[in-house]
Image (spheres, rainbow, N blue to C red):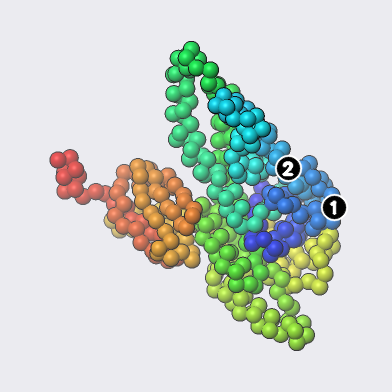
Amino acid sequence: MRILLFTGKGGVGKTTVAAATAVRAAQAGHRTMVTSTDPAHSLADSFGVSLGDDVTEIGENLWAEQIDAQARLESNWRDIQEHVISLLNWVGVDAVEAEELSVIPGLDEIFSLTDMRRHADSGRYDVLIVDCAPTAETLRLLSLPEVMNWYIERIFPIQRGVVRTIRPVLTRVTSMPIPDDRIFAAVERLHRNLEVVRQMLTDGERSSVRLVVNPEKMVIAEARRTYTYLSLFGYRVDAVVANRIIPEEVSDPYFVKWKDIHAEHLQTIRESFQPVPILRARLFDQELVGTKLLERMGTEIYADRDVTRVLHRDVPIRVRKRGPWYVLSMRLPFVERGDIDVHRKGDELYVRVGTYKRNIVLPHALQRLEVKQARFAEEGLEVRFAERSSGQARAERA
């Protein structure tokens, strides 16, 4: 199943572009599912139909849903939440406060991702189109699987082993609630689901992100940052959609200056994201509500392209042998030297860009080697690994 995720700064028209793409895919004969992870759902408004948490057929080869994040939270988190609430009650927290404190911010969003696996496993659809939240929320959503998996893979086994060892003693000396195997099983289910979703979304042949922008300075700046952070976590951007461009045929003097501004910003967009394809959609003279108008927009954006095709291929992270070096390259466009921090700890490489951090588990070929150099090259980070010199190894043994 092909997965297309649409995101952009709030108000740029990403929901309309996602809906238009869905209509175009369905008309091409692909069984298409379009869903929204944006808490402020507007898919129903775009299609002019009523949508809820259940999948609804809204046209030939076209289905839609607006995910109820709270319902997903309750079905995936309830067992763990009950233990957290009982623990908070034990330390004296009021029942209502315990209920609120038992939900980690962002969890409702991350469980929305589990629907992607459900739709992929069902085999009912050829294409899944996801109308994501505005960029800041989307970046948090897409980084959460890796962050939570890091915790679950490293800390969780230790906690489970300790609890099993000391449970007989604790139950005799304290009334504190101790997590049982049911709680740990719930955590393991969460881990498996998140890992499958992460693998799906970072598979460049299966999943792509399409950034929606307007020809505005602040919007373009945020899109550039988003592109960098998506690259950091291994997500592929295969197209940028420049939306609401004033058409050439508009000759009203009031819009002449705006047309010049749009032309200048379009050039910036092309230069910023090259060689990623830049698709365009004009500013329509009416609200794009309903399948007929969305069909017009889809035709304008994609022309004779197959919307499900991978429009651009890029590998955010690659490892190559170069002379005596093994070189790990990570594409991080638009990053300045002072924005990035790199260090190694054990078998992991820690890369921080701005406020986002990623822990990269090194391939086996690099785990036995030593980091010799980290530098900027070709719009990204280049880390060189090599064998430790025999003199250095003797000095360490001494």
Q: Looking at the figure, which quarter contains the C terminus?
A: top left
Mark 2: which secondary structure?
Answer: loop
Quick check: 75 left or right of 348?
right
Q: Amino acid at mark 1?
A: Val
Measuring 59% from the left and 48% from the top, which residue is drawn there?
A: 141
Q: Is residue 335 above or below residue 133?
A: below
Distance between the alpha carbons at the discs numbered 2 and 1: 17 Å
Quick check: 397 left or right of 333?
left
Q: Could you tell which of marks 2 and 1 lies nearer the N-terminus?
A: 1
Q: Amino acid at mark 2?
A: Asp
Measuring 47% from the left and 61% from the top, which residue is drawn there?
A: 332
Q: Is residue 25 above or below residue 109?
A: below
Residue 365 versus residue 340: which sits nearer the camera? 340
| Pointer 2 residue | 68
Q: Is residue 69 above or below residue 9?
A: above
Q: Nearer the viewer, mark 2 or mark 1?
A: 2
Q: Position of residue 292 (x, y in %)?
A: 84, 62
Is residue 131 visible in the rendered image? The answer is yes
The quadrant holding residue 254 is bottom right
Residue 49: image tag: 1
Measuring 35% from the left and 42% from the top, which residue is drawn there?
A: 346
The quadrant holding residue 375 is bottom left
Q: Position of residue 387 (x, y in %)?
A: 26, 49
Q: Which residue, as the protein is rendered here, is positioned at the far left?
A: 398
Q: Residues within 10 Å of mark 1 (few under 14, many from 20)?
A: some
